[in-house]
Image (cartoon, grey):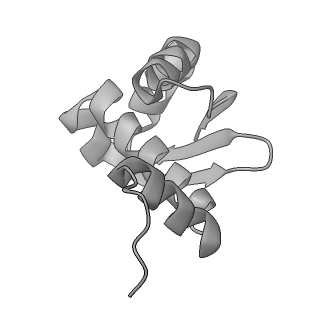
Amino acid sequence: MKRVDPILMSELLTLFTKRFGLEGDLKRVRVYQSWEDVVGQSVAKATVKKYYRDKDRILFCTMSSSPLANRLYFQSEIIRKRINEELQEELVDKIVIR
């Protein structure tokens, strides 16, 4: 077996995800996880459905309660900024609350 220089695990994971086309899926999972972390457990439980559209970077969230959806609609820009801060990159340009 041929020896090669050591490689960092983070670099190896990046190469692996690129080679097998998993970048979009990993971004989606990261966005969903950050939604739960930013809005809290109670709002995350009230989120019926989430969908992240990667091409225009929009996060769609369907809520189980109309009053909650209305409240989140007015806070969506703050939530978007916090999600991007947590991700340490701009992955979400807009949040649509339904």
Residue placed most toward the observer, 33 or 71: 33
- Picture quadrant where residue 40 is located: top left
Find residue 27 and report its horizontal and vertical position in percent: 54, 50
**Residue 21 appears in view:** no
Identify the residue at image location x=43%, y=81%: 2
Q: Is residue 51 visible?
A: yes
Q: Which of 81 and 69 is in front in this view?
A: 81
Residue farthest front in this picture: 2
Q: Is residue 18 left or right of residue 35?
A: right
- Above or below, comparing residue 17 to residue 36 in the picture: below
Relative to 59, 58 lies left or right? right
Percent x, y for residue 56? 79, 42
Extreme residue toward the left, this view: 41
For the point 47% across and 32% down, which residue is it?
69
Q: Residue at x 58, y 14 (%)?
A: 77
Percent coordinates x, y for residue 61 in the rendering: 52, 44
**Number of numbered discs present?**
0
Above or below, 28 relative to 40: below
Along the viewing direction, whichever of 45 and 65 lies nearer the viewer: 45
| Quadrant housing the C terminus | top right
Task: Return the residue found at the far bottom.
Answer: 1
- Residue in front for this viewpoint, 42 or 77: 77
Residue at 55% over, 22% down: 73
User: Quadrant where the N terminus lies?
Assistant: bottom left
User: Where's residue 89, x and y in %?
Assistant: 56, 26
